[in-house]
Amino acid sequence: MRAVAAVIAAAMTAVFLLCGCESLTFNVSDLLTAPSIADEQAEVYNALISSVGRPISLCYPRSGDYPSAFVLFDIDGDGLEEAICFYTYSQAVEPVVMLSVLDKPDGESWQSVCTLEGRGEAVDKVMLADYGGIIDIIIGYETPSFDENNVSIYRCSQTGVLSSIFDGAYALMDCVDLDGCGTKEIVMLKKEGSTASVRVIKTGNGVSYDIKERTLSLSTQSIVGFCFGGMTEDTDAVFVDILDTSGVMYTHVFYMMKGEILSPTLDTTGMYQLTSRYTALRSVDYDSDGIVEIPVSTPFLGYYSVPSSRTEYMTSWMHYDSGIGVFIIESATYYSEDMGVVFRIPGRWQNLVTVLHDDDPGQVTFCQYDIEAGSVDDMPRLMTLAAVPADESESYIESGYSYVKGDGVMAFLSKNLAPEGEPMLLTQDEISDNIFHVIL
């Protein structure tokens, strides 16, 4: 009963990811069939249990647009929905994902028509592409390997039998419009040994695939993450954050044009080195301007001679300027992943302030830099910023903090520490205009 309840409670969302450049269409209404999604899933679950004949555990995709163990869609083009079910055998020594396809050949009851063994122990994500009667089912599987998942692209025959038309491996995968054609390609990032590479799978007709590959790094410790967004106002790109074998983080940027993978960080000598940093900060559109920025870090003033475990870093954010073909710094900030906040250093603070190390990860204190001071602890304090749960903000206000801004979940507050009339103090508007809430 718990399993049935879990199935009924699962919410089906349907934002279908496209994988080519011809007319790919998705019909969201195909998932919303009467009498209700919950009732339909309960029927599928009962039919699946009957067909398997042994205890099972349902598998739910870990990410992506399909959070359900059941995907309902017309995968064979006969005008009727089939159900793709994901599960493992409960008492298996080494669990492996199983796929069963259920159909309603009589129009009344679900029956199993196909069962396959998947290529992993869990489901990472599921994507569907409809090429006008030809359906591709893209399934990513998690494996015991830390940095490698498996992917299979399946196609269904008119009898409901699935067969794989592509098998591969990836560390990270998504569907994005990498060449600006209006539809999406499959982008796979892969690490093999110390080599990181990208594979882009593009199809124009749902029959043939054009696969492009390119090496990103030959000294990769791990692929930390990737972000898709604006490289310039006119071009979107993928930003891949890679930790190399020496412990330095770099970002590689690539996009597609005329069927080829292009990269400003690879195609121009010395360009990717500009993205290096010794902190694990990831690329993100921190200020929501539509352009992804790359963070690079240097110690704040006063931290060059203190132990590295206490170093506070200033994060400068760079974006690519296609006019001159280089990355340029657009702002200098204090960035705290613990606080989920980027505070952009106002112009009149540039090269004049530093940050005091604070054991409380939810707040930070800015000080006026004094070259003659023995340490940052001895420098004049200007202001403390705090990021706290919204329901705790009142207690901070009672202790002298001022509310700056919030989003209903987090509240950002400030407290002036310098004497009244200190010209380095910021106004509330200056603080508010320069705080950005960032969640990676």
Image (cartoon, rainbow, N blue to C red):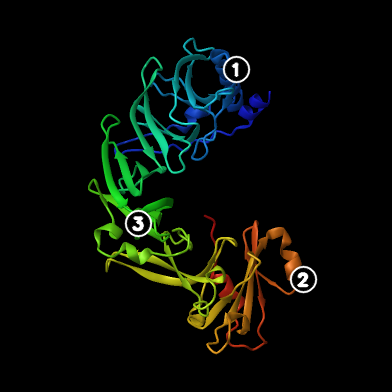
Marks 2 and 1, how far apart at CA: 57 Å
Which amino acid, mark 2? Glu
Rendered image quadrant of residue 90: top right
Q: How many marks?
A: 3
Q: Decide: marks 3, 2 in contact (CB < 8 A)?
A: no
Q: Residues within 10 Å of mark 3 (few under 14, many from 20)?
A: many
At label 1, the amino acid type is Asn
Local crowd size for mark 1, using a 10 Å CA cut-off: few (<14), some (14–19), many (≥20): few
Camera-near label (1 vs 3) is 3
Res. 105 visible in picture? yes
Q: Of the residues tagged 3 and 2, which is closer to the observer? A: 3
- The kind of secondary structure element at disc 3 is strand
Query: Residue at label 3?
Result: 252
Q: Is residue 123 above or below residue 176?
A: above
Kindly report the distance in space between the C-alpha atoms of the residues bearing marks 1 and 3: 48 Å
Q: Of label 1 and label 3, which has the lower sequence position?
A: 1
Give the labeled residue for mark 2: 398
Dot 3 amino acid type: His
Point out residue 105 in the picture as x, y percentages from the top left corner: 46, 11
Q: What is the C-alpha distance between the residues marked 3 and 2?
A: 47 Å
Q: Nearer the viewer, residue 21 or 263?
A: 263
